[in-house]
Amino acid sequence: MPIAAATWLGVVLGLTGLVWGAVIAALPCLVYTKMRLTGGVWCLALLLGFGAGTLAMQGYERDAAAKMYDGQTAVFSVILKEDPQRRVSSWGSVQWDARIEIVEVDSGNVVHLSMAEAVISGDTIKAFHRYDRLRVYGALKKGFRDTPPLIGVVKAKGVRHYEPARGWQAIVGQIRQNLHQRTAKLSSAAQGLIPGMALGDESNLQSEVKDAMKTVSLIHITAVSGAHLAIALGVLGAVIPGGRITRATIAAVFALLLLGVVGPEPSVIRAVATCWVSSWGLAGRRRGQPQTTLSIVVLLCVLIHPWIAVEIGFALSVLATWGLLFTGRELMECWRVKNRIFRFFIEAAALTLSAQLWAMPVLLTFNDALPLWGPLANILVAPVIPVVTIGGMLAAACGMWAPQCAEVLCALVAPCADWIAFVATTCAQLPAAQVPWFSGWLAPLAWIPLIVLVVVWQSLRRRIGGTRGGYHSHSGQRSSAGGS
């Protein structure tokens, strides 16, 4: 893991585009020149990551769309990367926006190719869907949502739909729309949570429920990630017979299909890449430690797609998974009980606490409050998450050719979705649902001592013979694919 962390740090420094990043990246070379090989490898990983990040930043700065000045108008050819979302601003106005990839920029005199990403805003986009290709006349506004890789907000004055989604992208759009139709007669909570937990589609999720889920740290269940993949693979492994090569092939194909349907979200990329590495090891009878698999995935992801290194979703996914692997199993061993019912809830508590322990520094960078009832909410909804996830996936799979079957599946899992919404809204209304914490950079820094204490406790416990440091190889694929 240290090599992957060094590469990740190097990419982040490279993406800053500042000279001091190069200086910091070069310091380990001086420190480890006369030390053993391990230090040199760390140094090499740091410099390799710095090079990848620098190249990505240079490409961003050279892009024609990024060179536009604030307020400049043009005709943009864009691809919607998500369904337009309805948002209510702090002063009460309603607006629709979505993340886009800019393909061309026509400023009137010349047409420039582009690969920049931005946010489009305007009422005229609400009728379109993810992967639709649009021609947008508007002005690029900088100073808001312009942190790389985003270049700003395109304020749409006129939109023309010049090409709908095609091929696999069109099929994905139909799958999503069919699932919305199958849930249309259900409660508002089920309409939002079933597509959200099955496909990562939050477009129908009520703002009140979404805010409550954020308050109690439940919003991660609608961001399809390793936990969803692990649940699905567990069911597939139980119902489909076959040897190791068959299981590895099924896992790899299903992970690829999930990536195609949900889209290249950071947490999905991490989970799918982990599944592929684990499947390759399973097929070759080289099951390795889950921590090693996670390290390889982090290394490959940040080098192939450097911008993922600064994505909050990717950081949360990696840290939560590391918490499950490094601390979660230790807590489960420490809190082991014989009663199966108690054991289920204790294991759920151990996994929830360990994931939140390691992910909290990232969460605190944009939310200076602690979700006091978050662990309780996660424990209460843990039994129904697999039900909604699997039921929603099955309904999405058969929605186009067996709509009645899909409606029955959605109706069966709807009470579980209602339970999740009830737990979220109830816990969010409890006293001290959000405990004030430090603000700014002091917020994550103040949490780090708690992580250090837990690591020291684990080290001492292992020394006195409580548990071993390693984890059993038979849990490798499922554990490393899990997480947030």
Image: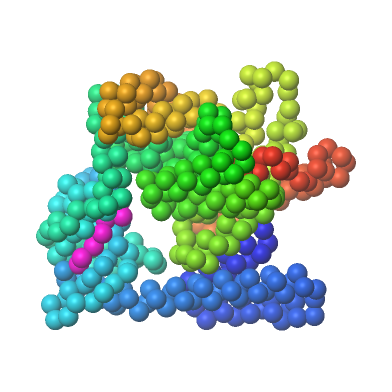
Q: Quadrant of residue 389?
A: top left
Quarter-of-image position of residue 116: bottom left
Magenta-drawn stretch contains 77: yes
Residue 194: % across, % down = 37, 32
Q: Which residues are magenta?
A: 76-82
Q: Nearer the viewer, residue 304 or 125?
A: 304
Q: Nearer the viewer, residue 142 or 173?
A: 173
Q: Inspect the magenta stretch and tell me whether residue 415 lies in it.
A: no
What residue sits 16% from the left and 69% below the top? 75
Q: Is residue 263 visible?
A: yes
Name the residue at 58% across, 35% down: 242
Q: Quadrant of residue 391?
A: top left
| Residue occupying the far right of the picture | 464
Q: Residue at position x 69%, y 79% from top?
A: 29
Whole-percent x, y for residue 84 in the image: 25, 49
Q: Is residue 447 left or right of residue 163?
A: right
Whether residue 290 is visible to the viewer of this picture, yes or no, is no
